[in-house]
Image (cartoon, rainbow, N blue to C red):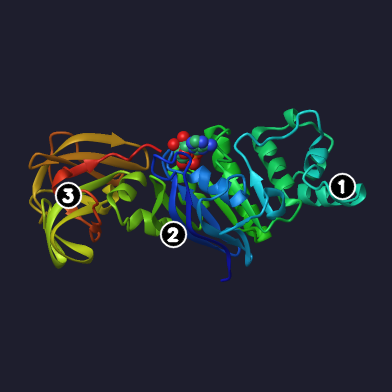
Amino acid sequence: MRTILQVDKLTKRFDPEAPPVVNDVSFDVEDGEIFALLGPSGCGKTTTLRCIAGFEAADAGSIVLQQRMLTGPGVHVPPEQRGVGLVFQDFALFPHLTVLENVMFGLPEKPKPEREQRAREALKMVGLEGFGDRVPHHLSGGQQQRVALARTLAPQPGLILLDEPFSNLDALLRQGTRQEVRTLLKEQGMSAVLVTHDQEEALSFADRIGVMRHGQIEQVGTPEAVYYQPRTLFVAQFLGRTNLLLSQAAGCEADTPLGRVSLNRSAEGTVLLSLRPEHLTLEAPDHGVGPVGEIVGRAFKGHDITYEVECDGSQYLVHTHNRMPYHPGDSVAIRPLESAVVLESRTTPRDVPTGAVEQVEG
Ligand code: ATP
């Protein structure tokens, strides 16, 4: 795969007294890849996107798109000359222009018949061929989002930047539109950078994710890698609920409050481990090899059940299929199904309580 975008050691600060808002951020995007910057509010993802778009000048670092330096020492290509398309949260459609005119608006420097043809082609790409004469408020939210996308695609940009593009759609429409937009970008072979604070959106929409916190990228990887193999406590917690185990590691195994478990990588001494609720299961106490606990909570969710189990003063979350027959008050043994993940903790592992931890809000 060819690298299309290289962001290298990008740094941006607004307040000289405060730490940079974007602090030494580096990542690459491959040709045809959808890359998501995921992180909580204020972590610097929009500022990173605005630096790529050229709306913000960087203090240090470089941005290279299709082998052309857009941002670098003494270089700042203006936004309109970057060959980058933008899709915003509010769609930014002109209410008094028709759908066709809105799409043509993205193609100002060409003769009108050429612009019209290109705009019609772009509307066809997004499945809105017959909608050119309507005004935006006669379309559904999902259709308006597709018009915004058609306007961005029409000038054939080298890269598309999507800033929380689905957050104005209601939950049901959001999921469908997300899937449609992903399919469309893939059909067109477009490369894109998505900014979002929504874990599920990043996991289902992107090919790779950069998880950001305090202006830095903590981990880059496929959705599976960042979810199943989080490198840090923050990544483990930001991508979902998990169980933390303060343990003594010796090579590929560790002694934990849930008994001896295998590890995803070799480690020595005191370590903090993460085990997702679906990587644990429950057994009758006489069958289990793990320690015995008591069910203290049960959330039946149709296709699955999440149990809260108290064991030696700590609570653990165990996510099982919907046929597990346990109820509050039952004694159970907890058994890990997968290797535990060794976290690179930036705090002293001793500061972190053992047991279930909730997902950090985005
Ligand atoms: P959100 O999801 O809430 O938009 P974000 O991760 O995209 O968050 P940014 O918008 O990049 O975060 O903002 C990062 C930090 O930089 C915030 O503390 C914000 O207040 C600050 N910031 C952003 N733009 C400016 C600006 N023009 N001047 C001063 N501070 C700014």
Q: Is residue 317 left or right of residue 139?
A: left
* Residue assigned mark 3: 348
Q: Is residue 274 left or right of residue 71?
A: left
Q: Is residue 283 visible?
A: no
Cα–Cα gap, marks 2 and 1: 39 Å
Total count of labels: 3
The earlier-in-sequence mark between 3 and 2 is 2
Q: Is residue 175 left or right of residue 222?
A: right
Cα–Cα gap, marks 3 and 2: 28 Å
Residue 31 image position (x, y, % from top left): 60, 65
Q: Residue furthest bottom?
A: 1
At horizontal 27% and vertical 47% (from top left) the residue drawn is 277
Q: In the picture shown, does residue 143 fall above or below 179?
A: above
The mark found on residue 222 in the picture is 2
Q: Residues within 10 Å of mark 2 (few under 14, many from 20)?
A: some
Quarter-wise, where is residue 293 in the image?
top left
The earlier-in-sequence mark between 2 and 1 is 1
Give SS at disc 3.
loop
Residue 192 image position (x, y, % from top left): 59, 54
* On-image quarter of the C terminus: top left
Q: Residues within 10 Å of mark 1 (few under 14, many from 20)?
A: some
Q: Amino acid at mark 2?
A: Thr
Which of discs 3 and 2 lies nearer the camera? The answer is 3
Q: Amino acid at mark 3?
A: Thr
Report if the CB atoms under discs 1 and 3 are less than 8 Å apart: no
- Residues 72 and 216: in front is 72
At horizontal 82% and vertical 44% (from top left) the residue drawn is 104
